[in-house]
Amino acid sequence: MKMTIKKVSIASAILLALTSQASFATNGLAPTGLGQYHKAMGGASVGNPVNTMSMASNPAAAAFIDDGYDVGLEIFSPNRTATVSEGIPGAGTTFDGNGIDNFFIPEGGYKKQINSTHSFGVSVYGNGGMNTEYAVNPGFGTGKAGIDLQQLIISPTWAMKFAEDYSVGVSVNLAYQKFKAEGIQNFSGISSSPAHVSNNGYGSSTGVGITIGLQGKIADDVTAGIAYKSKTKMGKIDKYKGLFPNQGELDMPATFSVGMAWQATPKTQIAMDATHIYYADLSATGNSSHVQLPLGSTDAAGFGWSNQSVYKIGVKQQINPKLALMAGYNHGKSPVSEGHTNFNVLAPAVVEDHASLGFEYKIDNKSSVTGSYIHTFTNEVKADINQLQAFDLEMDQDAVGIAYSRKF
């Protein structure tokens, strides 16, 4: 009966992930963190093994967490707008990209200790995405305009202790994404494949990458970790081979992270991470939007994003044996610059600062509930009209999530 419950829990998490709506992530394409516990602490997780979702950030965490599973769900509400810049005809006209207001982002994890040295687990999570839906077309074509990108990763994970307090881990990241664009027919005139730019429904692709990590206790009250997630080379999205560079190429970026957690007092923990996301190394996100080549062709225009460095800090305060409160902060300079706002009307990833609150409540010795709330402060990137950029981009966000943890 127990095994049946475990299987149903993990299967439910995977099914929920596969059928969920897209999200518009917050550190560029990426969520602030993975797992509600870590999101409540600003996303800091690489040096802080707490539950099965910790494996999603650092696979070495599998060696230090308890056997068990986690399932969770977040409701994500972004507010995105594009406004015609001063000095441009129609200045001040605002286009609302909130055709869909709320998105549901699932998560799940499972871990089993094989022997005293080896551990196995699997995590399932929304890797990120972007979504805009403008009821009034901002000039890209006719009808509603926008894009919808959904990315899912399922990560089988293995970890090994090579000393009492140190471990190494590897995850194989099995990735799936689907994408659609509508109302951007005007781009067909500058495309290498005009029939594969807009209004083709969802196209999809799959890919494989890896994450490797180290984690260990470097002092009695300090743990630390390091993790590298490789670029995930995705198959080409054939339905949009006239939009993305290299005939429909949309890969997932590599990331490099370091982190630590300090048990400052018996009741107070502080965790910190620094993550670098390599958006500029990918054709779709990194290529300049000013490249004078037909869309979809080799090395053609992309979104013009820069690499992004993200800094995360969180604190957990144990109030009593059952209840702990958490708070965090997350900052990453927007990868979108003032010289690339026009194309990014479709993907206005301009937010920079995120504050989070959360709690952990222990139901009993084996189960707990964790909740988080994240507010992303309004940020605006004004267009550089000297580069013929016509739109100022603005976004703010709110998210609330809940997760259940069970130890075996």
Image (cartoon, rainbow, N blue to C red):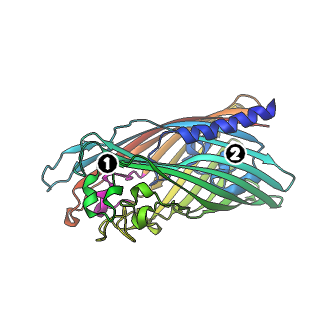
Q: Is residue 136 visible?
A: yes
Task: Give coordinates of residue 373: x percent, y percent.
Answer: 51, 37
Which quadrant of the figure contains the C terminus?
top right
Which quadrant of the figure contains the N terminus?
top right
The mark that comes first in sequence, 1 or 2, is 2
Query: Spatial distance from mark 1 to mark 2, Cα to Cα?
Result: 35 Å
Of the numbered discs in the image, which one, if any, rests on residue 362?
none
Query: What's drawn in magenta, residue-wise?
Result: 336-352
Decide whether residue 178 is among the magenta residues.
Answer: no
Residue sitting nearer the eye, 55 or 318: 55
As drawn, is 83 to the left or to the right of 87? right
Residue sitting nearer the eye, 164 or 209: 209
Residue at the image position 87 percent from the left and 53 percent from the top: 116
Determine whether the residue tagged by mark 2 lies in a helix, strand or loop: helix
Query: Circle 1 is placed at which residue position?
Result: 394
Q: Amino acid at mark 1?
A: Glu
The reply to whether discs 1 and 2 touch (Cβ–Cβ < 8 Å) is: no
Q: Amino acid at mark 2?
A: Thr
Task: Give coordinates of residue 89: x percent, y percent.
Answer: 12, 53
Outermost residue to the right: 116
